[in-house]
Amino acid sequence: MILPNKYVTTSESYIGISSLILNTLGKRTITIDKLWKDFEKKYIIKANLKNPPTFHKYVLVLNFMFMVGMINYTEKGEIVNENIKINN
């Protein structure tokens, strides 16, 4: 489930979904709800994914991303991409 294999495609794995979430997040600092709505518009409504993730799986992937250091949370609870330095 975390990594793709012969039963789990890349787009269904945590690693694959993480890349899509990072692409949606970009350089912004955004709330979980707003990021889900943007992700939904970009990948689920437009039917770009064969088996799109549910909100539950989306939250699990966010937890995975936080644990491996891909994202971090601000004091306001917004998500920050740890791979991109944001100059304030």
Image (cartoon, helix red, strand yellow):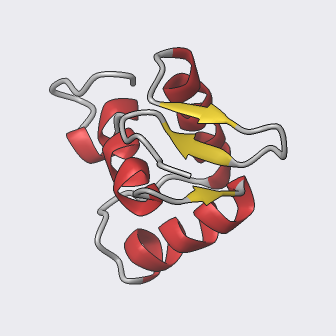
In this view, which residue lies farthest toward the front? 88
State the quadrant of the N terminus: top left
Q: In the picture, residue 14 is in which quadrant? A: top left
Relative to 63, residue 75 above or below? below
Depth order, front residue of 36/1: 36
Depth order, front residue of 70/27: 27
| Residue at screen point 53% across, 35% down | 61
Q: Image check: 71 left or right of 32?
A: left
Depth order, front residue of 59/7: 59
Q: In the picture, residue 7 is in which quadrant? A: top left
Residue 20 is situated, as x and y percent measured from the top left of the image, at 35, 53
In this view, which residue lies farthest toward the left? 6
In this view, which residue lies farthest toward the bottom? 46
Residue 21 is situated, as x and y percent measured from the top left of the image, at 43, 51
Relative to 17, residue 37 above or below? below
Relative to 81, residue 63 above or below? above
| Residue at screen point 53% across, 24% down | 64
| Residue at screen point 58% across, 36% down | 62
Residue 75 is situated, as x and y percent measured from the top left of the image, at 82, 37
In this view, which residue lies farthest toward the right? 76
Q: In the picture, residue 35 is in which quadrant? A: bottom right
Relative to 55, residue 75 above or below? above
Query: How many labels were placed on the picture?
Result: 0
